[in-house]
Image (spheres, rainbow, N blue to C red):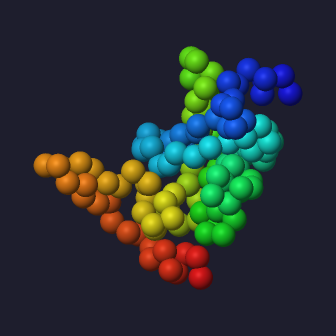
Amino acid sequence: MSWLDEVKWDDRGLVPVIAQEQGTGDVLMFAWMNREALALTAERGQAVYWSRSRGRLWHKGEESGHFQQVHAIRMDCDNDVVLLTITQLGHEPGIACHTGRHSCFFQKLENGVWSAVEPVLKDPARIYD
């Protein structure tokens, strides 16, 4: 899999990944992948990340049921950031964030204060029960 050799992995063997919703273009989340996670994502057509907090591979949706169907895998001009075009599955509208929101980027800086500007679509306690 020589295409994996073209990725500029950081000193921990990771590459940053952005998950963008197909159709809307919404940026849903940011995560990390190692070589195995990227290979599995390409093979399965579903997002698999490297969880730094868990210290293991993390198949997005394995606990929440909110899987990410991957339509395209792109890499930036420096070969050091990956962009996934995905459909967020498991809830309508899609929930990508562990807080029960559509996007992890739900906070907006307004007048020097971070404000939540997207609603909770499902109580996280009910997602991870």
Most foreground residue, 98 or 66: 98
For image coordinates 57% across by 46% down, the residue present is 31
Residue 116: give x, y in percent of width and height: 29, 60
Q: Tell me how many marks there are.
A: 0
Q: State left or right for residue 103 relative to residue 109.
A: right
> Which residue corresponds to the image point at 44% horizontal and 77% vertical from the top-left?
123
* Residue depicted at x 64% and y 62%: 61
Q: Residue furthest top?
A: 77
Q: Position of residue 68 (x, y in %)?
A: 62, 53
Q: Residue 8, position in %: x, y?
A: 68, 24
Q: Position of residue 28 (x, y in %)?
A: 47, 49
Report if residue 22 is visible in the image. no
Q: Is residue 55 above or below residue 38?
A: below
- Quadrant placement of the C terminus: bottom right
Quick check: can you spot residue 103? yes
The residue located at (78%, 27%) in the rendering is 4
